Amino acid sequence: MAKKKATPKSETVFSKAQLLQSTQFSQIHKDILNALLDEQSPCTVEHAKQQIQEFLQREAK
């Protein structure tokens, strides 16, 4: 029996404004996204979460 290959799902992209209005992020996470994301570059929720995690794991200087 042949296995079917999973087709990659196209992830929905959102504008910075849409992500900042989302109830999926806390206010602190929204503040981080506001500082990190570019106004003209849409991104996925997964990418936004990744950006937040990378920011939180940075070492303070």
Image (spheres, helix red, strand yellow):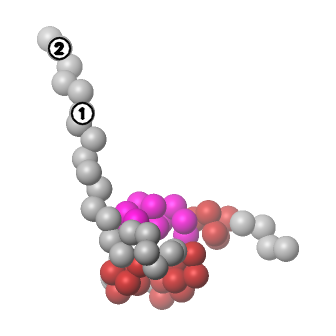
Quadrant position of the N terminus in the picture: top left
Against 1, residue 45 (above or below) is below
Residue 21 is marked as none
In what element is the residue under mark 2?
loop
Q: Residue at x 52, y 83 (%)?
A: 34
Residues shaded magenta: 43-52
Q: Nearer the viewer, residue 49 or 8?
A: 8
Horizontal relation, residue 54 to residue 60: left or right: left
Q: Residue at x 39, y 69 (%)?
A: 42
Please say whether residue 51 is one of the residues in the magenta stretch: yes
In what element is the residue under mark 1?
loop
Residue highlighted by disc 1 = 6
Q: Residue at x 27, y 62 (%)?
A: 12
Residue highlighted by disc 2 = 2
Quadrant position of the C terminus in the picture: bottom right
Against 26, residue 38 (above or below) is above
